[in-house]
Image (cartoon, rainbow, N blue to C red):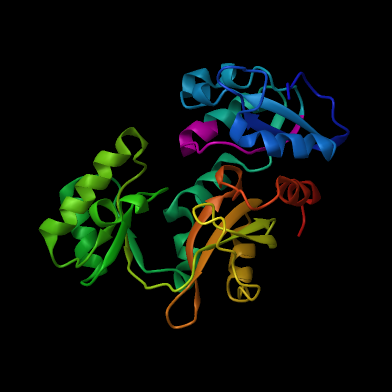
Amino acid sequence: MEVRGRVGHDTGVMLLVPADPLRPRRPDEHFRAEAIAAREAGLDVAVVDHDALTRSDRAEQAVALVPADGEAVYRGWMLRSEQYAAFAEALARRGVTLRTSAEQYRRAHELPGWYAALAALTPASVWTTGAMRADFDRARVELGTGPAVLRDYTKSMKHYWHEAAFIPDLADSEMAWKVASRLRHLREDDFVGGFVLRRYERFTSAEARTWWVNGGCVFVSSHPDTPNDFPPLDVDLDAVTPMIAALGLPFITVDLALRADGVWRVIEIGDGQVSDRPATTEPSKLITALRARTP
């Protein structure tokens, strides 16, 4: 599928996806199915250079193949908030407006942006504004004792659970810092914001990924890490729905899991543009939700 310009039928929204690094006029393989589904639904599709997007001084180059004018939704690889802001500005100079503003992207993408609104429904959390040990120790003491889970503002290293994510006891300062140091090392230049310490809670289900457009849940899927572990039909969204609506964010995902006491808890909120779709969810389902704009 080569993208040559605006040939769709729906002028309401344009889908932007990363280009294949080797064939820059074609969508990246990971997002090709969504691009095809969008074209089949009558949406315009354009490609952007993700490598260029990761450098703010190349944002203009990144969007060179995007047709001028209109509204757009991005579906692609994760971007730092400042990179997304440069992306939005470069598009604006072409008359293209991202449905999700740079400020909205940051609030959804970084835990400090959404935590206060969801504090009652998610594990207690504290964070630093950098990677210094003194700041980490202050946050560790503030959260208290007992087990905790560590991440940065946007991502954990849960696949390195025992060495870079799980802290058995916050009271053990040396062990806690060893885990933090390992996380910082593994994240390297992708480390965002600071350390986030979250109270450990025991969950008894795989995570369910819920997809929200303009404050309403449009569908529920499995989590991309466990695509074949389908969520139960009775995921309880009653408590979270008004809180998500109050955030006023146009397109997000909310990951939930069932705690040992039978309560659904929010694990993570993410901007829907950079939230992975599990392989077991048809791309047309996502495109239909984006095209509808309302739940």
Residue 140 in the image: x percent, y percent? Answer: 22, 62
Quadrant in the rendering for residue 204: bottom left
Q: What quarter of the picture does the C terminus occupy?
A: bottom right
Please identify the residue farthest to the front as the structure is shown: 228
Please give the name of the residue rendered at 45% of the width and 61% of the height, measured from the top-left corner: 115
Assess whether residue 76 is covered by the magenta stretch: yes
Q: Residue at x 55, y 63 (%)?
A: 229
Horizontal and vertical percent position of residue 276: 56, 46
Furthest-right residue in view?
Answer: 9
Q: Residue 193 at x, y = what percent? A: 35, 44
Which residue is located at x 70 percent, y 56 percent? Answer: 214
Asked if residue 203 is positioned above or below residue 186 in the image, the reply reads below
For the point 50% across and 38% down, the residue is 78
Q: In which quadrant will I find the N terminus?
A: top right
278 or 80, which is in the foreground? Answer: 278
Above/below status of 94 relative to 263: above
Q: Position of residue 152 (x, y in %)?
A: 35, 49
Is residue 283 a member of the stretch shown in magenta? Answer: no
The tally of labels here is 0
Q: Is residue 115 above or below residue 106?
A: below
Left or right: 44 as drawn, with respect to 90: right
Name, please, the residue furthest toward the bottom.
Answer: 261
The span picked out in magenta is: 70-85
Above or below residue 210? Residue 279 is: above
Is residue 102 toward the left or the right of residue 186 in the image? Answer: right
